[in-house]
Amino acid sequence: MGHSVHNVDISKPPGFILEEHTSSVYQWPSQIYVNQQRIIPAYETKDFRITDNGIETFLVIPAINTNVSFTGLMFSTYLPWDKFSGNTEGQCGTCDNNRTDDCRLQTGTINSSCPDMAHQWHVASAHHHHQSQCTPPPPEPTPTQPPGCDPPICHLIQSKVFESCHKIIPYEPFLVACIFDVCHMDDVTIGCTSLQTYADACAQAGVCIESRNYTNGQCDFTCEKPKVYNACGPQVEPTCNAWYV
């Protein structure tokens, strides 16, 4: 089954709000609210389930085969082609496997700047507990890549580490985004987030890759004992606790 995948990567941690039937889910980097009540994953209703592995938070809507992942720096949505082809707009872009028209305005015209386009789709929602107060920022000069900036961590995306995924998920957009982020942000570990994003896209396509093992310790993730990190493990570990069954 084909999917539309949309990734949002910005320098300040975003939040997102999702409405599903009568439920409202609000996600901020370290807190999750369902219908204005804070919850701790794993959490499940008849409409959706939310899990967290310490690195990413996952929201799954089985009825429409849709997944949303959130890392604190970016979120990604995975939409089934048979249900969403031609049925998305705004910050989700257009689900047509054509990146050139993703920055489309309400008028149908294409904006050359996706950040500028995103502010044009802002909708204030008075009934949300966390009402958005976004206002467009003042224009900033277009950033230029520092001379000679070519971070090695980004080139793992095009290396043999991900070779088994290259023919399934084109790596070029992820490589470009990684180089841009690492070269324009003070936090050098932002490259780990870019690697994780490509690894997630590969995993959604059925190819799991332990990419952190190839970063010379830069992207290591340590779990609280006695847990161990397993990139290819299940989202929810088997448990005797009936709450999670």
Image (cartoon, helix red, strand yellow):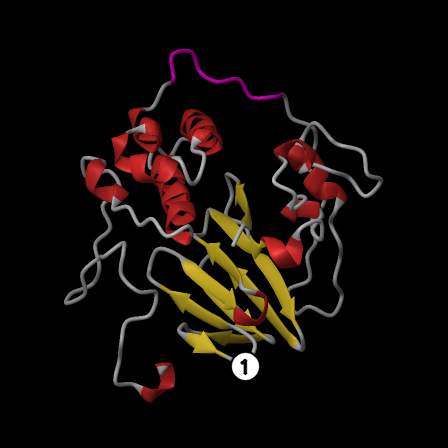
Task: Decide if residue 207 is on the left or right side of residue 111.
Answer: left
Q: Is residue 114 above or below residue 128?
A: above
Task: State the residue position of label 1.
Answer: 46
Is 153 displayed left or right of 88 in the figure? left
> Is residue 214 part of the magenta span, yes or no?
no
Q: Which region of the structure is painted magenta?
A: 142-149
CA neighbours of label 1 inside 10 A, class few (<14), some (14 to 19), many (20+): few
Residue drawn at point x = 28 percent, y = 46 percent: 209
Q: Is residue 204 left or right of residue 77?
A: left
Quadrant of image for the C terminus: bottom left
Which residue, as the protein is rendered here, is positioned at the far left?
226
Foreground of the two, 162 or 72: 162
Residue toward you, 216 or 110 = 110
Spot occupied by residue 174 in the image (x, y as percentages of width and height): 45, 34
Please state the horizontal and vertical placement of residue 5, each as a whole percent of the image.
54, 47
- Residue drawn 18% across the image and 35% down it: 216
Choose top left, top right, bottom left or bottom right for residue 98: top right
- Residue that appears at 59% across and 75% down: 36
Q: In the rendering, at what x and y percent does residue 79 appear?
A: 57, 55
Helix, strand or loop at label 1? It is loop
Q: Is residue 66 above or below residue 8?
A: below
Does the rendering let one see residue 65? yes
Q: Farthest residue in the right direction?
A: 107
Q: Amino acid at mark 1?
A: Lys
Which residue occupies the extreme bottom position in the image? 242
- Pick the front one: 116 or 97: 97
- Determine the image quadrant of residue 108: top right
Q: Give the main secondary structure, helix, strand or loop, of the magenta stretch.
A: loop
Q: Magenta span has 144? A: yes
